[in-house]
Image (cartoon, rainbow, N blue to C red):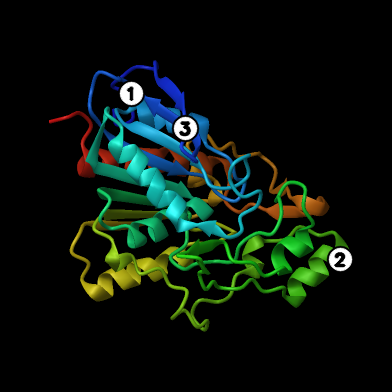
Amino acid sequence: MVGDPPYGRSVDIEALDDGLVGLFFHPDPTATLPGVILLGGSEGGIQERHAELIAEQGYAVMALAYFGLPGVPEAFQDVPLEYFGAALDRLRSHPAVDGDRIGLVGGSKGGEAVLLVAATFPDKGIRAVISLAGSGVVTQGISQSIFTGDFREIITVEVAGWTYQGRELPYLRNIWTEQMEKAVTAGQPIELGWIMPDLATADLEEVVIPVENSGAAILLIAGGDDRGYGPTYHEVTARRLEAVGYRHPWKHIVYEGASHMIISPTARRPAAETEPGPSGVEFLQGGTVEIDIAAQAETWRETVAFLGEHLGRRDS
């Protein structure tokens, strides 16, 4: 069965250093394995269990924090892309990692990040990129914690999420709609997707991620009932790859009826239709428990298969 861990469940864990924040997971220090960098989303920090599951499949995994922990920005604001370049260099130089077989896996904001990093550093051994419920355009940063911050300010305070070579990257700004205002004022559940501009009419020239600059195979997976980015933010990438005749393998999957919970095999889908957000706001989740559980399982199988196809597992 795809997904059964070939290395069992014993994984060595090291803390990162040299200015990087996160953990390094390796299932067999005696073997040279492909490397994977795993990036989380707007919650910040690292995805430890998700990283461990990938490592159990036969990969050296760097679970990398890029904000939300000591040593990196407190919020998702002005995160330098050079940080990811340094992480790639560190992973590739590890004696137990095959530096020419590197994969990137990210969910939500991390799904945006992996596409951006692959396009920015095509010469750093990246051979597989998996964006889960991510975005093919650069979206607005977040000025404060999504757990303790003020919801209205989180959405309306305009900040860049990323910088490169000392400059803020242009980004697609959030919108605070009349629909959002009425719902928040009335204490009614809201959809995070209400803040997302309509990509069919938005000016994307400066904010679209030039994924064609990557040299990697690319897998895009989204839930058809994702009330956040939604599948349209991946469709931008799919159309771009098709238009340029992208020379590497790529795949675009939408699980109809599924929500944002596909971002990780460890994400827990509550039975309730809503989940709590900052300032007492309730977010409509989309999907159903049954559909999301099935889509999570399929997403994990696709992830494992894609990494296996484009990175392999052992030194061979």
Q: Residue at x 82, y 51 (%)?
A: 280
Label 2 residue SS: helix
Location of the C terminus by quadrant is top left
Figure quadrant of the N terminus: top left
**Front position among marks 3 and 1:** 3
Location of mark 2 (residue): 185
Residue in the foreground of this view, choosing between 167 and 191: 167
- Secondary element under disc 1, as helix, strand or loop, is loop
For the question of whether residue 306 can be seen, the reply is no
| Residue 59: x %, y % from top left | 31, 31
Residue 260 x, y percent position in the rendering? 54, 51
**Above-or-below relation of 143 to 156:** above
Q: Residues within 10 Å of mark 1 (few under 14, many from 20)?
A: some
Mark 1, residue position: 5
Indicate the position of residue 23 as horizontal and vertical percent values.
Answer: 48, 31
Q: Depth check: 238 or 137 in front?
A: 137
Counting residues from the N terminus, which is met first, the one under dot 1 or under dot 2? 1
Q: Residue furthest left?
A: 316
The numbered mark, 3 or 2, whose residue comes first in the sequence reads 3
Which one is in front in this view, the residue at disc 3 or the one at disc 2? Answer: 3
The amino acid on which the numbered mark 1 sits, given as a three-letter code, is Pro
Q: Quadrant of residue 211?
A: bottom left
Dot placed on the residue nearer the N-terminal end, 3 or 1: 1
